[in-house]
Image (cartoon, rainbow, N blue to C red):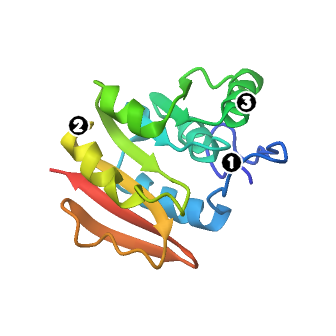
Amino acid sequence: MRIISGTHKSIIINAPKGLPVRPTTDRAKESLFNILENNFNFDELNCLDLFSGTGNIAYELCSRGALKVTSVDIDYGCVKFIKEMILKHHFSQLSVFKKDVFTFINQCTEKFDIIFADAPYALDKLASISELVFEKKLLNNNAWLIVEHPSNLDLSQQKHFFEKRIYGQSTFSFFKNT
């Protein structure tokens, strides 16, 4: 894994072995960020990275100039690694929380411009993430929720859905708060 663009371009992300993660591939991440760059001005964005894992998406957001990035993961090893990366690469706009994502969403009072959720594919509540985010009103106007999920799961009938992009076994489903 690497940071694709921005101030930290080409930094290799060497996560420790044994973390319970399935990082977004560089190819899929590059495609996602091409879409985002055509729709958002990064230096104005408040972003939330749910099920952050290695922090792969959060670092890319920081490198591209996001104003604020919040990372949430329940795994101690993942949170420890993200904290180390914050210090090592001076990601001052990145904060990380060790918390269950659903508890975080239920307690959160902040609004975001981009929320990215890359839950474990086997998570039985994966399809409910978009409903919960909109129920809790976590998105600003014209903000997006992007859910990464297995390609055999179809979220296109859910409220606020507007697009999906398929990258092999992974799909990004896009939801918009209008």
Residue 141: quarter of image: top left
Task: Name the secondary structure under disc 1.
Answer: loop
Q: Is residue 132 left or right of residue 117?
A: left
Residue 148 — which label? Answer: none
Residue located 54% across and 41% down the image: 64
In this rendered view, identify the residue nearer to me: 126 or 13.
126
Residue located 81% across and 47% down the image: 18
Picture mark count: 3
Badge 1: how crowded within 10 Å, few (<14), some, or many (20+)?
A: many
Badge 3: how crowded within 10 Å, few (<14), some, or many (20+)?
A: some
In this rendered view, identify the residue nearer to me: 157 or 43.
157
Task: Name the secondary structure under disc 2.
Answer: loop
Q: Is residue 173 left or right of residue 50?
A: left
Residue located 19% across and 43% down the image: 135
Mark 2 sits on what residue? Answer: 136
Residue 57 spot, x, y in % from top left: 57, 46
Give the number of the mark in front: 3 or 2: 2
Residue 85 — which label? Answer: 3
Q: Is residue 100 left or right of residue 23?
A: left
Q: Tag 1: residue type?
A: Ile
Mark 1 sits on what residue? Answer: 3
